[in-house]
Amino acid sequence: MRSFAYGWLLLLGIGTLFATAETATSEAQAAPKPAPEMQRLLGALSGTWSITYQHESAGDTPARGTGQGEEVYRAGPGGLSIVEEVHAVESSGNVAGHGVAWWDQSAKGFRAIWCDNSSPNGCGVMAKLAEWQGLNFVLHDEWEADGKRMLFKEVVSDITPASFTQTIYQGEIGTELKKVMTIKATRATAAKALPGKATQ
């Protein structure tokens, strides 16, 4: 009788193991995979970067000088997003920023959120899609200020395993955008192993 009970328990245990393995396999198969565009972005930017930057004058606004600090890019959960953290120091004080970008398959472009300590609202969702344009990664935003529709454009260019450049432009819709900041990034640490590599 005891051996029969043990045999029954063994069968139950084997059945549970198979059911658990099947569930895990099913869940793994159902988990979404990063889009090639997302893998490319992670491969290009993941890691820790030392940055120096220069503010430019924009219209009646004088340049705010220079700054230096650190940018860190890492993969979000499942590699489906990229997370950016920025810490820098300039003459006006400390700068802290946090951003998240992800691939929107239905829109065929990247969505992005940016937060920093100089924004009145803390965070904002960029109104336009970001995208790869050839070898450059380009972000766009649009908003209203003093009754005017304004445009923002950030171009991440000259991307290599050791460095890249971020150039930021903005201006009123219908006018030529003016360069307001140039950021030079140099790799401080090697990137972690991530799916995908930068496509050059």
Image: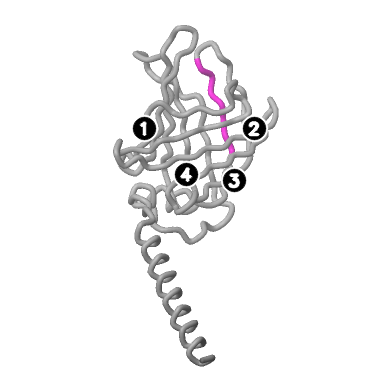
The residue type indicated by label 4 comes to: Phe
Q: Which of marks 4 and 1 is nearer the N terminus?
A: 1
Work out whether residue 98 or residue 200 is closer to the camera in this orientation and state it: 98
Residue 56 located within the stretch drawn in magenta:
yes
Circle 3 residue: 50
Which is more N-terminal, label 4 or label 2?
A: 2
| Percent x, y of residue 99 | 52, 37
Q: Name the residue under label 4.
A: 164
Q: Real-space Cα distance between discs 1 and 2? A: 25 Å
Q: Is residue 62 above or below residue 200?
A: above
**The magenta stretch spans which residues?**
52-58
Helix, strand or loop at label 1? It is: loop
Considering the numbered disc 4 on the image, is that residue within a helix, a strand or a loop? strand
- Amino acid at the residue labelled 3: Ser
Residue 128 sits in quarter: top left
**Residue named by callout 2:** 95
Q: Position of residue 192 (x, y in %)?
A: 52, 59
Q: Are marks 4 and 3 in contact (CB under 8 Å)?
A: no
Q: Distance between the residues labelled 2 and 4?
A: 20 Å
Badge number at residue 129: 1
Q: Residue furthest top?
A: 147
The x, y position of residue 20, in whole percent, is: 44, 69
In percent of the image, x 49 and y 82: which residue is there? 9
Please tell me in which quadrant of the rendered image residue 118 appears. top right
Residue furthest front as drawn: 1
Which comes before the other along the chain, label 3 or label 1? 3
Q: Which of marks 1 and 2 is nearer the N terminus?
A: 2
Viewer-nearest of discs 2 and 4: 2
For label 2, count other residues whose C-alpha is less than 10 Å away and answer few (under 14), some (14-19) or many (20+).
some
